[in-house]
Amino acid sequence: MTPHRSDRSSWVVDVLRLWIPSMALVVGLLLLIYEQERSHQAQRFEARHEAQINESFAIMGNRLAAVVRDMRYLANTQRLEAYLGGHGAQDQESAMLDALAEDWRRFMATRPTLYDQIRYLDRDGRERARINNRAGRVQRVPEAELQQKFDRYYVQEARSLPGDTIYLSRLDLNMEHGVVEQPLKPMLRLVTAPLRGRLQDGGLLVLNVLAQPILERLRSDATGSGPSHVWLLDPQGYWLLGDAPDQEWGFMLPERSQFRLDSAHPALHAALQASPPGPQTVHRRIDGGVFSFQRYDPGADTASLLSEVRLHDAAGVYWTLARWSPASEIDAAVAPTVARLAWIGGALVLLVSLGSGYIAWLNRRRAEALAAERDTAAALDRFIDSAPDALVVSDAQGRIVLANQLAESSLGYAPGELPGQSIEALVPDRLRSAHPALREHYLSEPQSRAMGDGVSLTIRRKDGSEFPVSISLNALPGRDGVRVISAIRDISAQQQAEASLRDSNARILAAHDATEQANRQLLEANDALEAFAYSVSHDLRTPLRSIEGFSVILLKRFGDKLDATGQDYLQRMRAASQRMEQMIDEILTLSRISRSELACVPVDLSALATELVAQLREVAPTRQVEVIIAPGMVAEADPTLTRAALANLLGNAWKYTGKTDRAQIEFGCDGPDGAREYFVRDNGVGFDMAHADKLFVAFERLHKASEFQGTGIGLATVQRVITRHRGHIRAEAAVGEGACFYFTLGAPPAEAAHG
């Protein structure tokens, strides 16, 4: 294999090492998003199922309630009471029965879609009168065609009930002369013993209710609600309303007895049996689909609508209304998201592939550069070992990276022992703490120092002994940062001659060194603060503005291609970048307050507060806030910093009274001049004093961002301003009772007070 082919194979291996875990992460993320979307769609189906089931039950309940009212009306008419209570001649009884039958016929004629028959049975179960509804033609059945109904289950069960009780039969098919009537006619029967207790006739009034309109209404609702399956089941799992009419009523038609839920959908039947339906809708996710069902007790549920009626249904009668949306329906709802994920996944695959290749190429280039650097380092080692002086090379962090043989031998270290140690290991113990500051100061302005002009120093051997040296320094910038080469020469003889002079100047030098060290530390602190401010204003604002700008471009150019969720994500990105920019502004304000010079003059705090409140009212002109500002409050302070502190305190009071009906804010003071304490009080939400220690800590907030916006820097800024004025600040509050912040403005430094 040629070297070129070997390098290519190595590069491919490097690419795969990056690509495989990255792709695993991408695939896992896409699968997680897909599962979350599918779960969300299943929840939507469950909510829709429950709403449709409740609507269907409301329709059935209202229809049955109307039927029960009609039954009660028929059982209590004066003509029926006259007929049942009459004991006259046979021709009089026949005339009353004819009149009663005519009343029933007229009654049914006004309700041709509700009722199939009205019958009156004597105590032996024989029909005495019957009104039939045949395809809208309402007529009385001749006496010769009246039947014996004593053996019907609803007659037997209704006879045992107390008077004024209405019996509700099972939902089944109508039978004529012992045979199921064709075409099939679903039927409910209401039975009652009219006037029982007052009359002793013992007969029964039977009202046959056409159930087909109710079932057709449920079927039409199912058709209009989408492809989901809608079923009405009896307690044995037979379909009263199913996917196809030829699969219904299997409990009465032997040729359809195989059409049951347990045979067509075993998993759904098992879920139904494991969770017997109750008064609440039950949801089960089975085989990727959504199965929802609820039990309906026609007797109990109808009686709950008619508290004045005693209603009794047939033993074990209840219906189960179920809706089944298989996995294919859920998948269809998730399909748009899957398509989007496919596009996103393809884009991510492309980005990961390109990124993996590029990173692998960079790693190869870096490895080659490191190899070249090692060769250069080896040559440098040989050069350093041949130097006449002890040479020590350290990096910007003060870590020794190279030392020649003369340095190791003169300092008492074994070959190779010095590299890796801190340069401070060569500094005497008494000077070690100050050396990092000196090193940082040199690196801030590196310059070469010749051996003849070198500074006389003392160096520490490994055993702790010391000897004087002269050191010349050279700074070499490189790819890994600045390298400092220290040339070390033993000047013990020279030091002995100068010992007396050094002793006389030691105290002065020590004081001078301490002063210079403090100055350097102060300079470094200011440099660090300036660097931080620059980083905040430049390095953080630039990407934030990019995010904001590209978000606006996306909304303008591609907003019509994004759904509501995508647009919401972009709006959130914009809001987050704007909040971050606000936080940057407040951090910069805090930084400027900490390092700006005080220029104290008399400040009219009352006028300043009035101006700030006016600005707040301009921002929220609809808010009604009572603001009380004590007049004549004047303090010796820096006007710019005082404005920042007072703006934060009044702004907080304005913000945290935003949910108070009658908001009140007061700015005043207590105590005489020289010991005056100012306060800003409000009746807003307040806070728990147990957390008062967090009030003036930057980025700490006592309220959630969802309740009140903010960055957590305002009170830290206030405390910094008060502290710079040699004052103090404290707070008192209670949850729901508002808060009060007290502060003083002490005497400023003399040089600040006079400019």
Image (cartoon, rainbow, N blue to C red):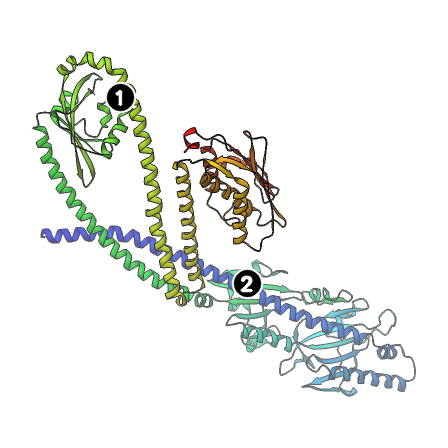
Kindly identify the amino acid type of the residue bearing the numbered disc 1.
Answer: Leu
Residue at image location 28% in from the left, 59% down from the top: 350
Give the quarter of the image for residue 239. Answer: bottom right
Is 187 on the left or on the right of 590, as rendered? Answer: right
On the question of residue 48 being in view, the answer is: yes
Quadrant placement of the C terminus: top left
- Asked whether the viewer can see residue 411, the reply is no
Give the percent coordinates (x, y) of residue 401. 18, 32
- The disc label shown at residue 47, or none: 2
How far across and how far down the image is residue 333, in percent?
45, 67
The mark total stands at: 2
Is disc 2 surrounded by few (<14), some (14 to 19) or many (20+) residues within 10 Å? some
- In this picture, is 742 found above or below 705? above
Relative horizontal placement of residue 632, taking residue 459 as reference (left or right): right
Element carrying mark 1: helix
Residue depicted at x 24% and y 34%: 444
What x and y, as percent, mark residue 356? 25, 53
| Contact (Cβ within 8 Å) of mark 2 with mark 1 | no
Which residue is painted at 9% across and 28% down in the image? 385
Labels 2 and 1: the sequence-earlier one: 2
Residue denoted by label 1:
431
- Using the image as rendered, state which of residue 262 and residue 526 is in the foreground: 526
* Mark toward the viewer: 2 or 1: 1
Return the residue nearer the eye: 3 or 482.
Answer: 482
User: What is the three-letter code of the residue carrying label 2?
Assistant: Ala
Q: Classify 498 as above or below 251.
A: above
Q: CA distance from mark 2 to mark 1?
A: 76 Å
Crowd rating for badge 1 (residues with CA inside 10 Å; few <14, some 14–19, many 20+)? few
Q: Is residue 170 above or below residue 176?
A: above
Give the numbered dot on residue 33. none
